[in-house]
Image (cartoon, rainbow, N blue to C red):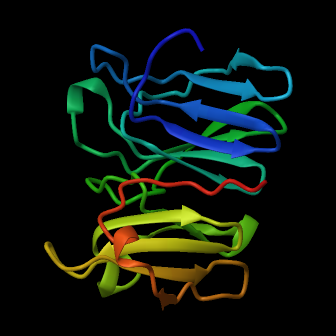
Amino acid sequence: MTSTRSFFAMVAVEGKVLIAGGHDESKNALNSAWLFDIKKNEWIELTRMSEERDECEGIIIGSEFWVVSGYDTESQGAFKKSAEVYDLSTGEWRRVKDAWRASQCPRSCVGVMGGKSGNLMCWAESDSAVKVGTCGFDLGYRTLVTGSAYQGAPHGFFLADTKEGQNGKLRKIDVPVYFSGLVQSGCCVEI
């Protein structure tokens, strides 16, 4: 990758890291996308998305890289309802018109129900216990969700089963107090 960017969508799948959107050092929203091949240790520029997407969120559904919502340079903070989807097998983008709720930031709260054939959902709307400061991390067929019931409330930690046939109901888990503050982002790495 030849330039610096912030607030971009990112996923890792099958030994590759894909990134898209975000903004440059001058806060200009980007529509470019890149793939990093871990085995070859090289960056490959992908075809550009049809729209700029700053503060977008990335998620893998099956063999597709979904770049959800975001906004362009001229409309700072006006989050789009659309998503752009990169098919890993064909290398082509397609646009999904009503993938997300307009005006809501998707960062860290996009979830998928139903496994590889699932639908996008917002963890902040899944349970009143996590409607503020929500953050979700995909763990395969489960998701770790953090958040609180209201501004200033203690943050709770929950697990949700997200595979096909599951309802995504949150199950509270106990976390040591020194790990129980506000979580803004996270990831899961399998070794």
Q: How many marks?
A: 0
- Horizontal relation, residue 36 to residue 2: left or right: right
Q: Is residue 124 visible?
A: no
| Viewer-closest of 174 and 93 | 174
User: Residue 154 falls in which quadrant of the image?
Assistant: bottom left
Residue, x 52% and y 89% (percent of image)? 169
Position of residue 65 relative to residue 138, above or below, is: above
Quarter occupied by the C terminus = bottom right
Position of residue 136 relative to residue 29, above or below, is: below
Q: Percent from the top left, x then y, of residue 31?
A: 48, 24
- Horizontal relation, residue 37 to residue 108: left or right: right
| Viewer-closest of 188 and 43 | 188
Q: Percent from the top left, x then y, of residue 147?
A: 33, 73
Q: Is residue 94 visible?
A: yes
- Horizontal relation, residue 141 to residue 103: left or right: right
Position of residue 23 relative to residue 117, above or below, is: above
User: Residue 140 falls in which quadrant of the image?
Assistant: bottom right
| Viewer-closest of 185 and 73 | 185
Q: Residue furthest top?
A: 2
Q: Percent from the top left, x then y, of residue 44?
A: 72, 17
Residue, x 71% and y 47% (percent of image)? 64
| Viewer-closest of 126 and 182 | 182
Q: Percent from the top left, x then y, of residue 102?
A: 31, 55
User: Residue 33 falls in which quadrant of the image?
Assistant: top right
- Horizontal relation, residue 107 to residue 103: left or right: right
Quarter occupied by the N terminus = top right
Residue, x 35% and y 77% (percent of image)? 177
Position of residue 136 relative to residue 74, above or below, is: below
